[in-house]
Image: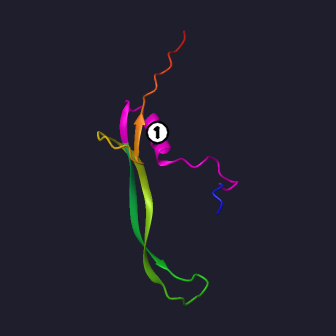
Amino acid sequence: MSSSLPSNMATSIYSIKELGSLIAESNDLDSGKYEVVIEFKLGSIQLGDEKQIDAATVPAMAVGIGGVGLRPFSGNDDGAFIIDHVKKAKAKNPK
């Protein structure tokens, strides 16, 4: 099974930690540990054979991602959802 990306991708795929680091940088967060929080959305759907006009449908549930954010983390565990953010110093404006 190949894990290569489709040719029409505009970016690479980011890991959870990479995504968390980008969120921390874009929000100018202070240095420290943060936990990546993923919000899930649940909804009901109907599954059935779309090719058949009178096909029976079956109720089902769909799970999607509603959003991603960060919250401060004070634990010692460095799990898959923990980032150690180092705030970058802002460049001085040369005059």
User: Which residue lies at the image location 66% right of the left edge and 60% below the top edge?
Assistant: 2
Q: Residue 54 falls in which quadrant of the image?
A: bottom right
User: x and y percent of residue 55 in the render?
Assistant: 54, 88
* Quadrant that contains the C terminus: top right
User: Which residue lies at the image location 36% right of the left edge and 33% below the top edge?
Assistant: 32
* Quadrant that contains the N terminus: bottom right
Taking depth in this image into account, of 44 and 31 the one nearest to the observer is 31
The image shows a total of numbered marks equal to: 1
Q: In the figure, is residue 94 to the left or right of 32?
A: right
Q: Residues within 10 Å of mark 1 (few under 14, many from 20)?
A: many
Q: Is residue 19 magenta?
A: yes
| Residue with the most extreme bottom position | 54
User: x and y percent of residue 40 in the render?
Assistant: 39, 59
Mark 1 lies on a secondary structure that is helix
**Start-end of magenta stretch:** 5-34
- Say which residue label 1 marks: 21
User: Which residue lies at the image location 52% right of the left edge and 15% below the top edge?
Assistant: 93
Taking depth in this image into account, of 17 and 88 the one nearest to the observer is 17
Relative height, residue 89 to residue 56 (above, below) = above
